Image (cartoon, coloured by chain):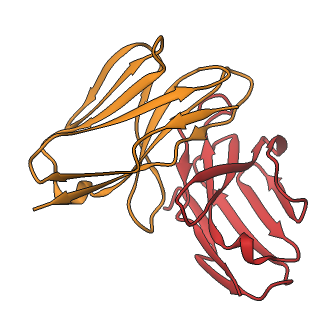
Chain colours: A red, B orange
Amino acid sequence: DTAVSQTPKYLVTQMGNDKSIKCEQNLGHDTMYWYKQDSKKFLKIMFSYNNKELIINETVPNRFSPKSPDKAHLNLHINSLELGDSAVYFCASSQEADYNEQFFGPGTRLTVL
Amino acid sequence: GQNIDQPTEMTATEGAIVQINCTYQTSGFNGLFWYQQHAGEAPTFLSYNVLDGLEEKGRFSSFLSRSKGYSYLLLKELQMKDSASYLCAVTPLTGDYKLSFGAGTTVTVRA
């Protein structure tokens, strides 16, 4: 009964490829997020959706495209992967957009070769 | 923008007390969070302060002074399992929705 789950946990791929990371939450939360944590452990917000509507879109290359088919799912698609995309990507959810206790998924470690 | 500062590393002995400071300069303020992150794992919620003062929760306490833009996380009776990174995060004014994280403080507990 995992609260926030992500797949895959590890992803190793070549530069230039396209890949997707999936996230699901079973907490009944309205808001979901994608974060990137780089090698220096700095956690930075990328996107947020509230009830399937995009509410946060930070300065992220347009190679990154989030998709929310329903409020329990927020997937992240990355086109034309680059070396600098290597990081751990965390999905998170919160009850509401302005109630910010966030519950994080286990993370996806992406390595681009 | 948001500017959140905390020390990079701290080391303490098992059974001791450690205080992790966090200062922030943000465009608005609607609350401050502390999260714990063990190596290779996801961040987990520890505490939330929106009013000035001390919030105590077992061995962990968090303090906030909004006028000073300052918070600290106090870890008492340190245990080996407390070795982790501790992240300070600030929420802006309602309507902005973003949770801005500091770079984290890595605490190492030694026997």
Q: Is residue B102 left or right of residue A56?
A: left
Picture layout, residue A77 above or below residue A45: below
Name the foreground residue: B25 vs B58. Answer: B25
Q: How many marks?
A: 0
Residue drawn at x 47%, y 10% is B67
Residue drawn at x 80%, y 76% is A82
Question: If the image is split into quadrants, where does the N terminus of chain B sit?
Answer: top right
> Which x, y percent locates residue A49?
77, 44
Picture layout, residue A83 above or below residue A5: below
Picture layout, residue B66 above or below residue B42: above
Question: If the image is split into quadrants, where does the C terminus of chain B sit?
Answer: bottom left
Q: Is residue B14 left or right of residue A96?
A: left
> Which x, y percent locates residue A108?
61, 71
Q: Is residue B93 left or right of residue B102?
A: right
Picture layout, residue B66 above or below residue B8: above
In the current view of this chain or complex, which residue is farthest to the right? A62
In terms of image quadrants, where is residue A42? bottom right
Residue drawn at x 69%, y 40% is A30
> Which x, y percent locates residue B32?
49, 28
Name the foreground residue: A21 vs A63. Answer: A63
> Which x, y percent locates residue A37?
60, 60
